[in-house]
Image (cartoon, rainbow, N blue to C red):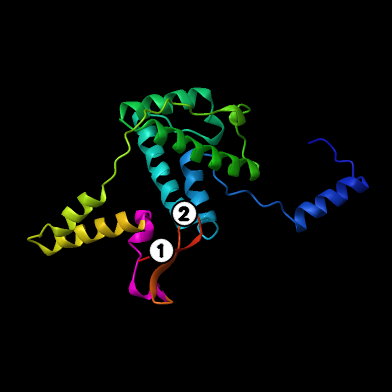
Amino acid sequence: TPAIDPSREWLVSTLDNYYNPKEVSNVPTDLLEFFDYYLINQKNIIKDGTIKKMRVVRNKIERFQKATKTNYRIKDVNQFFLDQWIEWNLKEDYEPSTINNNFKSIKTVCNFARRHNIEVDKSLDFLHSKVRENKTPVVYLSFDELDKIRATPMKHEYLQNAKDWLLISCYTGQRIGDFMRFNSSMIRTDKGRKFIDITQQKTGKQVSIPL
């Protein structure tokens, strides 16, 4: 065994390591495991809707790994990963907008990992999913059509409930996550007129909807 030079620097370093041992990082470097770490770490920081969206992406990654028989690490998110990801999503008949947005979520998690000193691919900042989106027709109901729906009798209570919620959604123009939270306590009367006051989940904006 080579002799150790008991210099001042060596002694200070040895004592410091003994009394202040460096903590071993428990932050995972696998992509799927880090997604779980991200969801736990951010659950009280980002909105519930974003958490749900990230869980969907996380589960897609799990299926993607099974299909490709590969366990990807954070640093494996590169151009090859992106090409494989797009190819698999298209085979699964996902819409281009969904593919593009899901990859943005993956990049968000990878950038979070980088802030935790996890190695990422050097090309990460330049990776973009640009699957061409198909133009979709604008679907809407006219007021005459809404009146016909309103006047149509329903044989079962669950169909009547579905009809009511459809009409409510059309007349209030709110996202499903917002209008399904409507209740009577949100109704406000101002100068004889009634309004529904709600804070939108996605935007955090407070809106008043006239009834």
| Residue 24 magenta | no
Q: Determine which of the numbered discs, if any, sits on residue 209 in the image.
A: 1
Return the x and y of residue 197 as percentages of the image width and height: 43, 68
Q: Position of residue 145 (x, y in %)?
A: 20, 49
How far from the left and from the top, in percent, is residue 72? 47, 33
Q: CA distance from mark 2 to mark 1?
A: 17 Å
Reply above or below: 8 against 122: below
Task: Give the residue number, with chain letter if any, for mark 2.
Answer: 202
Q: Nearer the viewer, residue 145 or 126?
A: 145
Residue 89: quadrant of the picture? top left
- Residue with the most extreme right position: 8
Nearer-N-terminus badge (2/1): 2
Q: Which residues are magenta?
A: 173-189
Amino acid, disc 1: Ile
| The quarter of the displayed image where residue 140 is located | top left
In-image side of 184 versus 39 (left or right): left
x 35%, y 27%: residue: 90
Q: Position of residue 202 (x, y in %)?
A: 46, 54
Q: Residue at x 9, y 62 (%)?
A: 156
Q: Please, what secondary structure does the residue beneath circle 1 have?
A: strand
